[in-house]
Image (cartoon, rainbow, N blue to C red):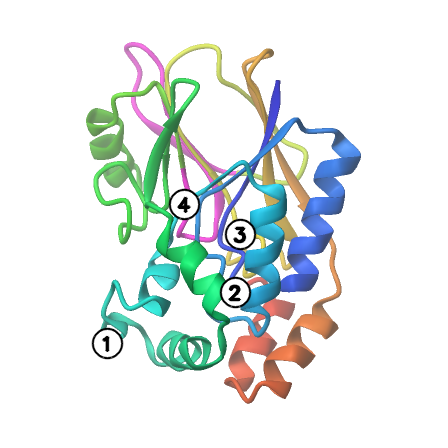
Amino acid sequence: MTIAIISDVHGNRPAFEAVLADIAAVGCDRVWCLGDLVGYGAEPDRCVELARTHAELCLAGNHDLAVIGALPVSEFSAWALEAALWTQRTIAPDSVAFLRSLRSSAERDGIGLFHASPRDPVWEYVLSVTQAEACLDRQTERIALIGHSHVALSFSRLDGAATVGVTHQPAETVDLAAGRWLLNPGSVGQPRDGDPRAAWLELDLDRGAAVYQRIAYDIDAAAAAILSAGLPDGLAERLRYGQ
């Protein structure tokens, strides 16, 4: 069984559609989403609709929680705050109802799923080996999936070895047969690792392996939607640089 792991769509409909087409071409059996369907981007309702249609499992991210009023928007940066308030004003009631039904962590097939981390499913950015070690100690599952940082990476700790962190390039395969793992697929809608292409992770449970995937999408269309909505220009411009 192969599972497509996606995260951090952030209202970017062109990126989400490109990833879903790529997932279909690869032939994954299921789609799991680690949260943040909304925020930053200008098409939240369409992204919620696509998630409801295609994702077997979906978590709530911090932006999702802020939009439904379950998290204070005052904790956000200026751009994130402006996008969250805009989304609150424009999002459809059906989309809000779906976001309210989600939780920030789950377990499936012996795998832990967290929007942010096993220690803090909502807020922690796991970007260092020190943070990863603490999370690997905390998680009860051998393999955990995390999002939130928008960086395609993994942390692993093999028996008797130190924890290692790796930022992954497209088409890199990770052997999951041994050790404890944290896997981050990167971001569908707003990558922050210098590669502007939409990111997702192909998880093969039968083979015990994961493949990091990237797919180009229509950045101009996503940027134009942001500008048309009156959101900050920087949210459109950053898409072109993967930052």
Q: Looking at the image, which residue is at 65% across and 69% down? A: 240
Q: Is residue 2 magenta?
A: no
Residue corresponding to mark 3: 187
Q: In this view, does 114 lie above or below 17?
A: above
Which one is closest to the eye, mark 1 or mark 3? 1
Residue corresponding to mark 4: 59
Q: Position of residue 217 (x, y in %)?
A: 74, 59
Label 1 – label 3 distance at C-alpha: 23 Å
Q: How crowded is mark 2: few (under 14 residues within 10 Å), some or many (20 or more)?
A: some
Label count reads: 4
Which one is closest to the eye, mark 2 or mark 1? 1
SS type, badge 4 = loop
The type of residue carrying mark 1 is Ser
Which of the marked residues, 1 or 3, is nearer the chain's N terminus? 1
The type of residue carrying mark 4 is Leu
Q: Looking at the image, which residue is at 59% across and 70% down? A: 43
Q: Residues within 10 Å of mark 1 (few under 14, many from 20)?
A: few
Q: How crowded is mark 3: few (under 14 residues within 10 Å), some or many (20 or more)?
A: many
Which of the marked residues, 2 or 4, is nearer the chain's N terminus? 4
Residue nearest the observer in this picture, 186 or 204: 204
Label 2 – label 3 distance at C-alpha: 11 Å
Q: Give the residues in magenta.
A: 146-167
Residue corresponding to mark 2: 243
**Residue 174, located in which quarter of the rendered image?**
top right
Label 2 – label 1 distance at C-alpha: 23 Å
The type of residue carrying mark 3 is Ser
Q: Position of residue 91 (x, y in %)?
A: 49, 73
Q: In the rendered view of the protein, which quadrant contains the N terminus? A: top right
Residue corresponding to mark 1: 74
Which one is closest to the eye, mark 4 or mark 1? 4
